Image (cartoon, helix red, strand yellow):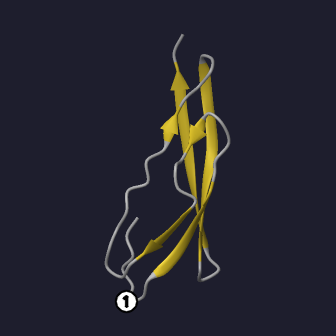
Amino acid sequence: MRNNSFHTHELKFVNPREPFYIKHSKYSLRSQHYINLPVQFKPGAAGQYSAVLLVQTDTSSSLRIQLSGEALP
C-alpha cells in the first residue's frame, strides 16, 4: 500500500478469519511512503479458503482485500 497524499494516515487492519493471519493491527503510513503487509496462510486441513482483510483509515474510508488460498493434501 502506498500513501500518495501529503499527510500521514493512520491505518487499522482488521484480522481476517483463519487460516489467514497478519502481525500488525495498526500502522502510521507517512506521506509518499509505502508498506508491504505480509499475510500468513496456515491451514489446518486440505481445501480452498477465502477471507477478507479490512483496512480502515483515519479518513473514514476502508479498503477490502480479498484473500484466497488452497491447501493441498
Residue at screen point 63% across, 51% down: 15
Q: Amino acid at mark 1?
A: Phe
Q: Which residue is mark 1?
A: 6
> Left or right of 8: which side holds 46?
right
- The quadrant in which residue 58 appears is bottom right
Residue 73 % position (x, y): 54, 10
Residue at screen point 64% across, 43% down: 51
- Tell me if residue 28 comes above or below residue 71 in the rendering: below
> Tag 1's secondary structure?
loop
- The quadrant in which residue 67 appears is top right
- Tell me if residue 67 comes above or below residue 32 in the rendering: above
Q: Residues within 10 Å of mark 1 (few under 14, many from 20)?
A: few
**Residue furthest out toward the right:** 17
**Residue furthest out toward the left:** 32
**Residue furthest out toward the top:** 73
Residue at screen point 49% across, 38% down: 40
Q: How many marks?
A: 1
Residue 10 % position (x, y): 53, 76
Residue 53 % position (x, y): 59, 53
Residue at screen point 51% across, 15% down: 72
| Image quarter (top left, top right, bottom left or bottom right) of the N terminus | bottom left
